[in-house]
Amino acid sequence: MIKTTIGNISQQENQEVVIEGWLYNKRSSGKIQFLQLRDGTGFIQGVAVKNEVSSEVFNLCKELTQESAIRVFGIVRKDDRAPSGYELTITNLELVSLAMKYPISLKEHGIEFLMDHRHLWLRSKRQHAILKVRAAIGRYAREFLDNRGFTHIDSPIITSSAPEDSGSLFEVDYFGEKAYLAQTGQLYAEAAAMAFGSVYTFGPTFRAEKSKTRRHLNEFWMLEPEVCYLDHEGSLKLQEDLIEYIVQNVIKSCTLELKTLGRDIKELEIIKAPFPRITYDKAVEMLKENGMEIEWGEDFGAPHEIYLSEQFNGLPVFVTHYPKDCKAFYMEPDPDRPDTVKCADLLYPGFGEIIGGSERIHDLDILLQRIQEENLPMEVYDWYADLRKYGTVPHSGFGLGLERMTICITGVDHIREAIPFARTLNRITP
Ligand code: ATP
Ligand code: MG
């Protein structure tokens, strides 16, 4: 008898195994009980035939409730009709615990009900698939950067500085002083890059924005690479290679999950570098030609981004050189067009922004001037300015939102399903 998992079942064809898991669903046709089993690694059908198991086991199968914990013994059979390719002929079954009446049935429920029961909803096939893909994205993102010699640096979550939009900061009491939850790890990543060359932070970030869109969370995870001696163009190259690596590896390792989600793999297979690039100027022109309302100098809204994202044959597009006034103070002005900065947002087809990045200002005087122009409190940026005093070099970095990447790969339509426990305007439990 081999203890195994559903995820590894293909290695045990025709052998007798035991799986420790739960009853996902059940149906019967008199003499046969069909048990849908799950064990965290996957889903498989177990079949108990009346005359082939003891009467105790057969009766137990009949009495099992949805989500009861069970240990299932059986022989692994190849079955091409099964999504996993295998079925289990049940030989024995042990009850670990009988579940009370489970609130989530496999029929339709309203979204608020499901979010109230998120702690249980995670067990459903679809949610399981989405979060498996999310985990794979994180894994491949780190793998890509680790393979290129990046050092993973953790930036603080409690900060005293308020980098960008101070209106969207969560305030915390720090022994009587005001402190804030980090909106980004970038400034710390820049400091670390000067020590380690190529670094990335990957952690939770917090934005107290009262938005109710399908792509904003108040707590989300961001991957933020930062690289010394890397210019704007080099950064775009790094970004497209990273996205290609993530997407192409997720297709290979999450085949079953993407199938569960009904994802069109062809749309993912074409996500390969290089990605097209257009300037902000050109983007405004395209939007105007399409009759959309926008003036030079305004930031894009979701409809603008979605329109632009759909004009490049299914490839993501970089929009570069935004007006200085739309973007953060630390972005390097373009010497040829000083009213714009060397930045780019990467727009994913049909979705919009998944990455925001730029070359950073490395000259002390220009940085101080920009801080002043934006009326930012100089004392907050003292240490940040130090980085420009001691061996400053050109450097670039960007931020990729993990949940937005998850939406783009899985095709789910709301970001609340792309994170285990979403924090949104009206929700902080479970
Ligand atoms: P948006 O304009 O869509 O609000 P942003 O310009 O505020 O995005 P950045 O500050 O550049 O975004 O953050 C970098 C990346 O982090 C974004 O490209 C996105 O993938 C992700 N991100 C930003 N805000 C959120 C959010 N509220 N929820 C989830 N992901 C986010
Ligand atoms: Mg924002």
Image: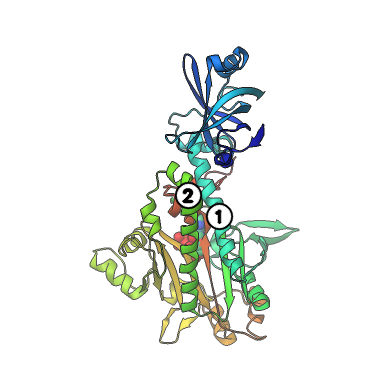
**Quarter residue 71 falls in:** top right
Q: Could you say which disc has been placed on residue 415 in the image? A: 2
Name the spot of residue 297 as percent of width and height, x first: 37, 73
Q: Which residue is mark 1?
A: 220
Amino acid of disc 2:
Ile
Task: Say which of 160 and 21 sits in front.
Answer: 21
Name the spot of residue 231 as percent of width and height, x first: 51, 80
Which residue is at a point 56% across and 45% down the rendered structure image?
Answer: 420
Would you say the beta carbon of the disc 1 residue lies within 8 angstroms of ligand 1? yes
Quarter of the image for the C terminus: give it: top right
Q: Residue placed farthest to the front in the image? A: 14
Would you say the beta carbon of the disc 2 residue lies within 8 angstroms of ligand 1? yes
Classify mark 2: helix, strand or loop: helix
Which residue is at a point 65% across and 23% down the rendered structure image?
Answer: 95
Above or below residue 281? Residue 402 is above
Q: Is residue 333 visible?
A: yes
| C-beta proximity under 8 Å, tags 2 and 1 | yes
How many numbered callouts?
2
Name the spot of residue 6 as percent of width and height, x first: 57, 38
Classify mark 1: helix, strand or loop: strand
Name the spot of residue 131 as percent of width and height, x first: 53, 46
Amino acid of disc 1:
Phe
Which residue is at a point 64% across and 70% down the rendered structure image?
Answer: 188
Above or below residue 103? Residue 164 is below
Q: Earlier in the sequence, mark 2 or mark 1?
A: 1
Task: Give the Cα separation between the discs numbered 2 and 1.
Answer: 10 Å
Horizontal side, residue 228 vs residue 81: left or right: right
Quarter of the image for the N terminus: give it: top right
Q: Is residue 210 visible?
A: no
Task: Say which of 175 and 424 sits in front.
Answer: 424
